[in-house]
Image: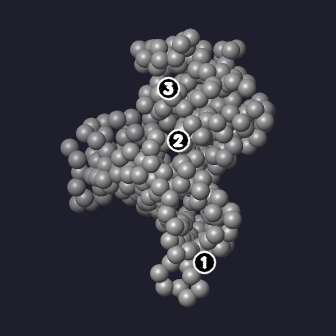
Amino acid sequence: MVMRVAIVGCGLIGHKRAQALGEHRLVVAADLDLARAHQLACRYPGCAAEARWEDAVRRPDIDAVVVATTNDALAPVSLAAVRAGKHVLVEKPGARSAEELEPVLEAVGHAGVVVKVGFNKRFHPAFLKARALVEEGALGPLLYVRARYGHGGRPGYDREWRAHPVRAGGGELLDQGVHLIDLARWFLGEFVAVEGHIGTFFWKMPVEDNGFLWLRTAAGQVAWLHASCTEWKNLFCFELFGRDGKLQVDGLGGSYGVERLAHYRMLPQMGPPETTMWEFPGEDSSWRLEFDHFAECARHGRTPAGSLEDARAALEVVGRVYRQAATSGMRPGQTGETRRAG
């Protein structure tokens, strides 16, 4: 079944989502800036442009809505689309907080639609292969995760919407950090203990440019995570350790480097492990694979990988760290002698 789609938010991610629709059809592009909506719509024959997203999500010729707005609009647009009976793919983090996501969760229970959150990292080929290896038992019982995800920003980064506490809802921990939290939870399960630190080390902005996390499951497995926008050289590294070996994902393509997966299998005599490497060069296929998965779940009424519940769990972790920071009195922008941009 070909899905008829509306995209709300016609920036960089809106364009990426449009390009990843595959056989599905973009019917309307909506943005508060009508010129941006027209810029996206003109690339797809028969696609209309709208300035009012409220009109776009209610159209009777729409089956699904992709929400690619700034964080402050993610939950309101998703809620309106769900209430209009549409399936929804909403960009991560899904909302600015777990509390803001609750009305969407409640509405989905009454509407009978499928809502997926844009955790596209799960659909990178290295992670699909890693997941298959874990399910085959290649690592044995899982022990811990160590992961880093970072970029260096760009001139004026501290004046973009991601640096605005109301529009963004938080800084780097909420932006890229939720990907790391979601991936760690995907492999290890629920986290019962959360400790973290946020700081603004360089960028002159009221949200954090670095987030550090220590998470623990009920079984004692641990995740050490660091999300940063002071990385200077873009970096992605995700390491998963088990009793019988280790998996390591490096790179995401593009400026993050060629995507690779390494399997280090521990030998009975220990010492240097048996090493198998996979490389995944070329175009990032995760956006298309994620939308295909979303469309299949919508068709059959299945819960997607990267669900609203997954987003709520990640947002609860972020919220706990933000509350810890508020309680300690160390808010973003208070890092003493650290260097700032500007």
Q: In terms of secondary structure, where does tag 2 sit?
A: loop
Disc 1 residue type? Arg
Look at mark 2 in the image and give the residue it sits on: 285
Q: What type is the residue that disc 2 sits on? A: Ser
* Residue at 53% over, 27% down: 18
Label of residue 9 in the image? 3
Front residue of this view, candidates 145 and 16: 16
Chain-order first, disc 2 or disc 3:
3
Query: How far apart are the alpha carbons under marks 2 and 3?
Result: 21 Å
Relative height, residue 1 to residue 222 (above, below): above
Q: What residue is pinned by disc 1? A: 243
User: Going 41% across and 14% down the picture, which residue do you hit?
Assistant: 35
Q: CA distance from mark 1 to mark 2?
A: 31 Å
In depth, the one of 245 and 95 nearer the eye is 245
Q: Earlier in the sequence, mark 1 or mark 2?
A: 1
Element under label 1? loop
* Type of the residue with mark 3: Gly
Neighbour class for label 1 at 10 Å: few (<14), some, many (≥20)? some
State which tag comes first along the sequence, 3 or 1: 3
> What x and y, as percent, mark residue 24?
63, 25
Work out whether residue 231 can be spotted: yes
Image quadrant occupied by the N terminus: top right
Residue 169 is left or right of residue 291, and the answer is left
Q: Distance of mark 3 from mark 1, alpha carbons?
A: 45 Å
